[in-house]
Amino acid sequence: ITSVRVMKDETGQPRGFGFVKYVHPQDAVVAIQAVNGKQINGKTLHVSLKTSPAKNSAFSPDHGPGRGRGMPMGLGPTGPVPPHPAL
């Protein structure tokens, strides 16, 4: 892990999501598979690779929900993030 960032609102309270950077992409895949779907304090974790919204898509800053914040947690560009084939 090279960095961790928890997103917070204007009052400093966590917004419920964050980002973790890994040196090796395969380490991120292992972490996703180990943690995605687990429950902590009654809440289910949704963990996925960060995706960039396509220009002029429903997730772009000028079009649709999220005001350009990217894909919903736990989803890749075409649905749920599939398991890594090497694992």
Image: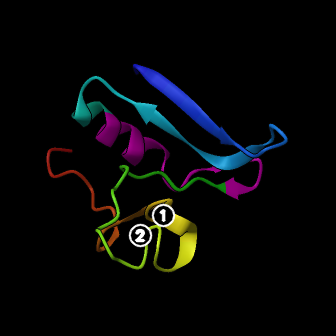
Which one is earlier in the sequence, the residue at label 1 or at label 2? 2
Residue 30 on the magenta segment: yes
Check disc 1 and give the amino acid type: Gly
The residue at the far left in this view is 86
Cα distance in 3D space between marks 1 and 2: 4 Å
Residue at x-position 36% and y-position 49%: 49
The residue at the far right in this view is 11
Left or right of residue 57, residue 61 in this image: right
Query: Which part of the image, by quadrant, shows the C terminus?
Result: top left
Residue at x-position 58% and y-position 53%: 45
Q: Is residue 82 above or below residue 40?
A: below
Query: Which part of the image, by quadrant, shows the N terminus?
Result: top left
Q: Is residue 70 above or below residue 10?
A: below
Residue 73 on the magenta segment: no
Contact, mark 1 vs mark 2 (Cβ under 8 Å):
yes
**Whole-percent x, y for residue 4 in the image:** 52, 27
Check disc 2 and give the amino acid type: Ser
In front: 12, or 75? 12
Residue labelled with disc 1: 68
The residue at the far top in this view is 2
Residue at x-position 71% and y-position 56%: 43
Residue labelled with disc 2: 60
In terms of secondary structure, where does tag 2 sit? loop
Q: Is residue 16 above or below residue 20?
A: below
Q: Specify start and end residues of the magenta stretch as a single range.
A: 28-43
Quadrant hosting residue 52:
bottom left
